């Protein structure tokens, strides 16, 4: 019996959008350590087709500070079968990287048709408050297994701690991808901030920092919330409405659930059209028990319809949980709607270490969660069609750094349609499976 549910039987006084219908569950293969026990202490991961062969490769980064001094800065090329042998390749050029590599993404930053690596580098905590962000440029299919050249995003080192959230999106809709991160605190005022790095021509960036007015918290998502075709930003129960000119004008802070931060100020979030009404909704999970991280609900919030003042209706999947450090939206069962994938890397009295799937009936009503894996969680998990067979697989390290390993859970749905080579990985936090439209493109 799923013990998390056993621990949370009181479902009163809140809207519960789970346990209301029976749904066929997807079979997943047992977890596979794609590094074959050669890596331990993973701090961040990403996935995408790096070598252009139509299959998803996996970036595995091992930060030294919480991995007994070990550092891995590599990518693993996927074999024809997920269960085969993965080939390790080094990015190289890593001497300048610090001990905490807390966030990484892949995206085509230079518009040359291949995926580049974006990675943060800082000291996590302590007296030395330093942070940088780098872009490692994919040298192209013919040289992809050699060292990758890089350039700085931050022209000089920033006085920031603990960059643990990163999204890539074209915020100003100028055809160049921008970088959005959230740092835990700054050196001087201990402010918690969201930082936007708008990409200029010539691999330079313009920085814009936004105070969250929440102390030492984390979690953000990027996606279209209103109808202006400019991506917006969500964080800890609020959203930042994009202005006409995101570079020069202020974002407007609006509420989704203004009380969430008073219970748990550490969140993980995702944006997507959960109920199929054409408007992107927001799902929020309590990520950690640290820094005022109380037990609270895993819930999705219904977009009231491109308005700035209407209330967001809360729909609770689990009424009391915590340590949900991965929350993703994706169509796991290929029925055309967004399912919810969660990963819990640590347990407490209301949550068990696990990887879980909540299946959507198409209207935002979710099934009893399926436990895909018990005893292993997801710290920075993701979903991606790794083997290009038309369904979404699950990838992520089982816990934070230290002894964590890079695992993959293969989706065993039978192939139903000819696959399309996966070139880019996300629209916000929503993963688009080949041949399946999940939400409007930006």
Image (tube, rainbow, N blue to C red):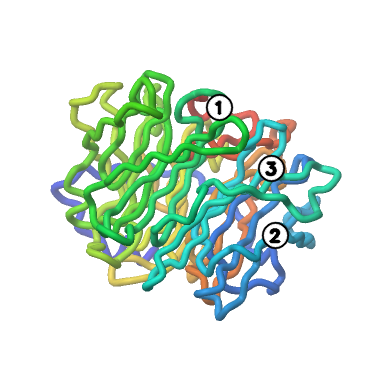
Quadrant of the drawing holding the N terminus: bottom left
Residue 360 showing in the rendered view: yes
Up/down of 253 relative to 374, above or below: above
Mark 2, secondary structure of its residue: loop
CA neighbours of label 2 inside 10 A, class few (<14), some (14 to 19), many (20+): few
Residue 320 showing in the rendered view: no
Q: Which residue was labeled with disc 2?
A: 93
Write the residue at 22% across / 64% down.
292
Q: Residue furthest bottom?
A: 68
Mark 1, secondary structure of its residue: loop
Q: Residue furthest left?
A: 13
Q: Which mark is residue 299?
A: none
What is the CA distance from the residue labelled 1 to the residue labelled 2? 38 Å
Which tag, 3 or 1, sits closer to the chain's start?
3
Q: Which residue was labeled with disc 3?
A: 414
Q: Which residue was labeled with disc 1?
A: 437
Up/down of 266 relative to 240, above or below: below
State the image coordinates of residue 356 (x, y, percent, origin top left).
46, 56
State the image coordinates of residue 171 (x, y, percent, origin top left).
45, 30
What is the CA distance from the residue labelled 3 to the residue labelled 2? 41 Å
Mark toward the viewer: 3 or 1: 1
Which tag, 3 or 2, sits closer to the chain's start?
2
Which tag, 1 or 2, sits closer to the chain's start?
2
State the image coordinates of residue 73 (x, y, percent, origin top left).
66, 63
């Amino acid at each position: 019996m799923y013990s998390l549910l056993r621990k949370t039987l009181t479902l009163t006084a809140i809207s519960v959008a789970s346990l209301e219908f029976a749904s066929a569950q997807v079979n997943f293969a047992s977890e596979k350590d794609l590094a074959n026990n050669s890596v331990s202490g993973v701090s961040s991961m990403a996935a995408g087709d790096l070598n252009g062969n139509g299959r998803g490769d996996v970036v595995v980064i091992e930060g030294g500070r919480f991995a007994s001094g070990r550092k891995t800065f590599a990518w693993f090329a996927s074999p024809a079968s997920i269960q085969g042998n993965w080939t390790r390749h080094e990015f190289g050029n890593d001497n300048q990287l610090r001990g905490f590599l807390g966030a990484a993404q892949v995206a085509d930053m230079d518009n040359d048709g291949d995926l580049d690596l974006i990675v943060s580098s800082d000291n996590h905590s302590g007296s030395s408050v330093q942070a940088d962000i780098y872009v490692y440029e994919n040298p192209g299919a013919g040289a992809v297994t050699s060292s990758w050249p890089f350039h700085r995003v931050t022209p000089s080192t920033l006085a920031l701690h603990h960059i643990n959230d990163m999204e890539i999106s074209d915020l100003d809709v100028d055809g160049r991808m921008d970088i959005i991160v959230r740092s835990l605190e700054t050196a001087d005022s201990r402010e918690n901030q969201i930082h936007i790095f708008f990409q200029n021509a010539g691999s330079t960036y313009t920085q814009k920092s936004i105070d969250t007015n929440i102390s030492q918290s984390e979690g953000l998502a990027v996606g279209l919330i209103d109808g202006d075709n400019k991506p917006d930003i969500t964080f800890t129960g609020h959203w930042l409405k994009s202005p006409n000119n995101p570079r020069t004008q202020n974002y407007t802070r609006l509420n989704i659930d203004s009380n969430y931060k008073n219970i748990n100020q550490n969140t993980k979030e995702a944006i997507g059209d959960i109920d199929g009404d054409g408007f992107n909704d927001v799902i929020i999970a309590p990520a950690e028990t640290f820094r005022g991280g109380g037990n609270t609900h895993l819930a999705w919030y219904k977009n009231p319809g491109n308005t700035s003042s209407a209330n967001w209706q809360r729909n609770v999947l689990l009424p009391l949980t915590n340590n949900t450090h991965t929350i993703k939206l994706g169509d796991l069962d290929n029925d055309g709607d967004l399912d919810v994938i969660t990963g819990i890397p640590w347990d407490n009295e209301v949550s068990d270490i696990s990887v879980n799937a909540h299946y959507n009936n198409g209207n935002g009503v979710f099934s009893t969660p399926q436990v895909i894996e018990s005893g292993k969680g997801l710290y920075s998990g993701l979903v991606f069609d790794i083997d290009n067979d038309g369904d979404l697989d699950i990838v992520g390290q089982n816990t934070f750094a230290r002894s964590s390993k890079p695992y993959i859970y293969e989706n065993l749905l039978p192939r139903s349609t000819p696959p399309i080579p996966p070139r880019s990985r996300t629209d916000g936090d929503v993963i688009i499976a080949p041949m399946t439209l999940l939400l409007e493109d930006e």
